[in-house]
Image (cartoon, rainbow, N blue to C red):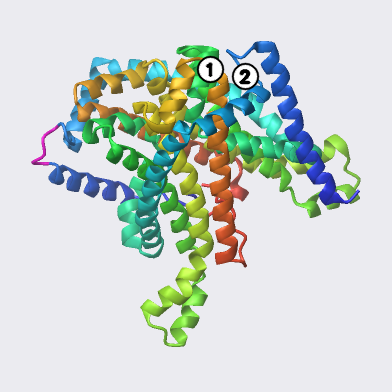
Amino acid sequence: MDPDRHRWLLRAGGIAGTLALWELLGRWQGEALLAPPSLVAVELIHILRDGKIVTALLGSLSNMIVGFALACAIGMPLGVAMGRSRVVDLAAHSWVSMLVVTSVAALVPLFIVVLGTGVVFRITIICVSAVFYITLAMYHGARGIDPRWLEVGCAFGTSPVAAFWKIMLPALYPYIVAGARIGLTQAIRGMVVAELFVIIGFGGMIHTAGLAVSTATLLALLFTLMVIGVAANEALRWIGRRLAPWHEARLLNI
Amino acid sequence: MRGTRISYLYPISIFIGLVIWEIAVWDLPRVIMASPSMIAFKLVDGVASGAIPRAFAGSLAHLGLGYALAVAVGVPFGFLIGRSRTVFYALDPVINAIYAIPPVAFVPFIVIWFGLFFEARVVLVFGMSVIEILVTISVGARSVERAHLDVARSFGARGLALTIKVVVPAVVPFVFTGLRIGLVRAIHAMIIAELFLAAVNLGSLMKQAALRFDTGALLAVVVVLAVFGLIVQEGLRAIEARLLPWHVRN
């Protein structure tokens, strides 16, 4: 058999097997503990039609996008500056490492005291979740720029500004995409952390579904989150292929 | 983060940052932002009174048990997924799907299954770290150089000998990376569990401090977590450098 087809069959088999196992487990345990996928699918259609969740989701996602955009606007220049300048690296690196190791969840109570529980708080949590991962991805990209490319530019009399736009920036494209992908995953995680803690928006609905012990709703909501995560990731990967077709952006291992 | 040199300049940069912070919040009320000296005071106070060490010891219990379970499950299964093409292609979409869901979103589900206390905390730590270990090790096990395997095979290595002498040494660096990332995630899960399930240990210290609008005490706990995370991460990295000197990448 042709290996590509074999691979797809295995993938489909894996998904089908998981669903079948889940269905069996769900039937055996009952809906209060684990709703089987057949019930979850019905529930998913039901909540999508109802529209309340769609509204909550759109609100949450728009916060997420604002926070993510802020994180890119802060993290990308910071990462490049850290990668290209020894002084900036020294000033910022230890702080960035410390904040990446610290869970954002640990900062949630602090931000609530300082910022309250409104939109500003949620956007801040989302931004903080993503910003240091984006910074580190850009830092690695900026450090890894081959000095010979810059020397060639120098030999041809390129001004520093032109060297940035024509040499450094294209060299950073793959890292911009990789950083954005890691950052977006983290931003979605941050969104759920913030909303689950103050019980609002989409995260609040997850909490409510848990309290009501309605696992069908709960799993339908988790499924929605999964689809959003996968779709966002694929969209960024597609942009990456358009932006830097010579470099299949890999997820950096940080 | 890879290639970070432990340099004497870093403590100096942290010190300068703290001085700037201290000056910046000089005139602000304490509720808005605590100064580093305030945090240090609260930290010393918390350690001396025994509240922080007691809470920290309690947190270590579910961290340790959850992480140990994650290692016991994640390492062999990661290896299996990476070495068998069939298992890899069958499970890859499922693992990616689970990985795409923010882990905190599982909290209400964990509450339904395991309640609010110790078992639930262990499950959250286990779940969040096992998936990182699994993914990292399976990637490593997949990327064993074909040429190395071919050379070993042409010298007659088969089965177990091939696995022990070629595959395992090639995967060990990824095992270390997986254990390190897994442990950092486990520490995240440890505090998430204490804040999102029933508030206990460090999480309860934080919630009480938040009720008192005591940002100094809140940040003292954050500092404990950050320093603990950094020590654990750099410690594992140092062990890796001692055991696998050929693999230390810069």
Assess whether residue B239 is covered by the magenta stretch: no
Residue located 87% across and 37% down the image: B159
B201 and A196: which is toward the camera: A196
Measure the C-alpha gap from mark 2 to mark 1: 8 Å
The answer to whether residue B95 is above or below residue B166 is above
Residue A178 location (% of width, % of height): 52, 54
Residue A247 location (% of width, % of height): 61, 64
How would you rate the neighbour count of disc 1 (Cα within 10 Å): few for under 14, some for 14-19, many for 20 or more? Answer: some
Left/right placement of residue B216 relative to residue B110 reads: left
Label whose residue precedes the other's in the sequence (2 or 1): 2
Residue range highlighted in magenta: B26-30
Residue B32 location (% of width, % of height): 17, 35
* Three-letter code for the amino acid on which mark 2 is drawn: Ala
* Three-letter code for the amino acid on which mark 1 is drawn: Ser
- Circle 2 residue: A35
A181 and A148: which is toward the camera: A181
Element assignment for label 1? loop
Name the subunit of mark 1.
A
Residue located 37% across and 50% down the image: A71
Element assignment for label 2? loop
Q: How many marks?
A: 2
Task: Work out whether disc 2 and disc 1 sit on a shared chain.
Answer: yes
Assess whether residue B28 is covered by the magenta stretch: yes
Mark 2 touching mark 1, by CB under 8 A? yes
- Circle 1 residue: A214
Residue A245 seen in the current view: yes
The answer to whether residue B223 is above or below residue B61 is below
Residue B164 seen in the current view: no
B161 and B57: which is toward the camera: B57
Residue located 40% across and 45% down the image: A62
Dividing the picture into quadrants, the one containing residue B51 is: top left
Residue A89 location (% of width, % of height): 35, 57
